[in-house]
Image: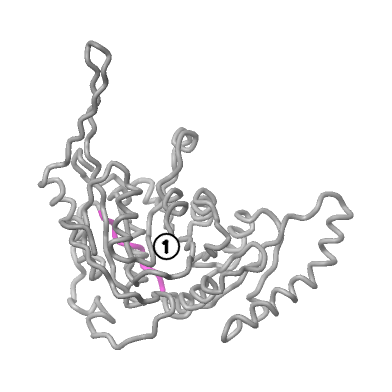
């Protein structure tokens, strides 16, 4: 059961990556046909740039021979059902051994390894990917994945959760490639998608990615924003320290809920809106994912100033490390206009 007062409810278990297509109403299939005029922009939002319809590639990258068939099949399903494109598979081997002799041995073994990799994936995917879309390369994992994604023109990178990629590495790949990165873990919960936003990115890429997935996969969707309570610390004359937690007023919570609802209407998403108030945003996201029985959590990743990188980890990295569900990390501020965007007005409680 969901916690009281959150507006959340439990979902029947489904597999958002592999579920069978079901009949849907015309409203579900084409939200844009509801009105001839585009919806008005919410405060602080920017219209996305128009892109011509074309097939997009999904890159599945694993270090060695992956044991996660679920993640592989999920990437295959996403390529076919969401991105309407091709699945490319990247096998990343350890970096070449030092010295000329080591490099020569690696080159001699490279051909045999590539044949083994292609046989491995032919046996596990139906239909199997063409041989030219199964790659084997060696080197530092993050660097190799980013280079391959750029070379292939990928729209999504999928990493198997069984490889236990660190949150910092996932965030690094997302920023370097400028692409969303999905850490795919085996579905053991319901079929919902929870997308968290702090309203700081005018493009709302995390919400856009979540809406696209939910619409294509017929999944339940929830938009989440956390309003941190104010903590006032004081010290008495005797040296005793005390902390007072001041919860945000109802008006501030309702304002944030209204903004989430406006974004849902603008994006054409059937989304429940949740406004939490937790000192730690990590806890708010994980609690909402648990209440919804979510299979997927979508978070944005913003480039951190060097001081923040030294003294702490990004929220997206912490969610990847702590969450038991699949996590999609969407890079924020990856284009020029994002850097120039003015943060929308948010009251002091957010």
Quick check: 2 above or below 128?
Answer: above
Farthest residue to the bottom: give it: 23
Nearer to us in this view, 330 or 245: 245
- Residue 241 position (above or below residue 257): above
Residue 47 is one of the magenta-drawn residues: yes
Q: Tell me if I can see residue 217 in this picture.
A: yes
Nearest the camera: 183 or 82? 183
Instruction: Indicate the position of residue 114 as horizontal and vertical percent values.
Output: 74, 72
Residue 316 image offset from top left, x and y in percent: 42, 51
- Quarter occupied by the N terminus: bottom left
- Residue occupying the far left of the picture: 251
Span colored in magenta: 45-52
Q: Is 99 part of what is drawn in magenta?
A: no
- Number of numbered discs present? 1
Q: Residue at x 39, y 75 (%)?
A: 16
Residue 335 visible? The answer is no
Residue 337 in percent (x, y) is at: 37, 51
Looking at the image, which residue is at 56% across and 74% down? 69
Which residue, as the protein is rendered here, is positioned at the far right?
101
Q: Secondary structure at mark 1?
A: loop
Point 51% across, 48% down: residue: 168
Q: Nearer the viewer, residue 82 or 271?
A: 271
Quarter of the image with the C terminus in it: top left
- From the image, tell me which residue sits under label 1: 325
Q: Is residue 137 left or right of residue 240?
A: right
Taken as a whole, is the magenta stretch helix, strand or loop? loop
Q: Nearer the viewer, residue 203 or 107?
A: 107
Q: Position of residue 206 (x, y in %)?
A: 36, 59
Say left or right for 239 vs 61: left
Dot 1 crowding, Cα within 10 Å, few <14, some 14–19, many 20+: many
**Seen in the image, is 35 located left or right of residue 82?**
left
- Vertical comparison of 52 with 327: above or below: below
């Amino acid at each position: 059961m969901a916690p009281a007062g959150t507006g959340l409810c439990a979902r029947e278990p489904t597999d958002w990556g592999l579920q069978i297509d079901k009949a849907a109403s015309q409203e579900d299939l084409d939200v844009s046909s509801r009105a001839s005029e585009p919806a008005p922009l919410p405060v602080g939002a920017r219209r996305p740039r128009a892109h011509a319809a074309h097939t997009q590639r999904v890159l599945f990258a694993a270090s060695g021979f992956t044991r996660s068939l679920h993640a592989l099949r999920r990437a295959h399903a996403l390529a076919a059902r969401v991105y309407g494109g091709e699945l490319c598979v990247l096998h990343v081997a350890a970096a070449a051994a030092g010295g000329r002799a080591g490099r020569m041995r690696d080159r001699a073994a490279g051909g045999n390894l590539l044949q083994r990799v292609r046989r491995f994936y032919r046996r596990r995917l139906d239909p199997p990917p063409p041989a030219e879309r199964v790659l084997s390369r060696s080197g530092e994992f993050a660097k190799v994945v980013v280079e391959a994604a750029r070379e292939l023109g990928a729209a999504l990178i999928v990493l198997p959760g069984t490889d236990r990629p660190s949150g910092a590495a996932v965030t690094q790949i997302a920023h370097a490639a400028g692409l969303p990165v999905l850490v795919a873990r085996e579905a053991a919960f319901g079929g919902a998608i929870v997308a968290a936003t702090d309203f700081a990115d005018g493009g709302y890429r995390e919400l856009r990615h979540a809406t696209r997935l939910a619409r294509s996969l017929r999944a339940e969707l929830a938009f989440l924003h956390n309003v941190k309570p104010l903590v006032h610390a004081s010290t008495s004359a005797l040296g005793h320290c005390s902390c007072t937690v001041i919860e945000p007023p109802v008006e501030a919570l309702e304002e944030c809920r209204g903004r989430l609802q406006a974004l849902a209407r603008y994006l054409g998403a059937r989304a429940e809106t949740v406004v939490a108030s937790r000192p730690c945003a990590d806890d708010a996201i994980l609690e909402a994912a648990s209440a919804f029985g979510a299979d997927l959590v979508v978070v944005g990743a913003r480039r951190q100033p060097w001081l923040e990188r030294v003294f702490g980890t990004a929220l997206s990295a912490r969610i990847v490390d702590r969450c038991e569900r699949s996590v999609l990390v969407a890079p924020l501020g990856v284009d020029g206009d994002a850097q120039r965007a003015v943060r929308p007005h948010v009251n002091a409680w957010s």
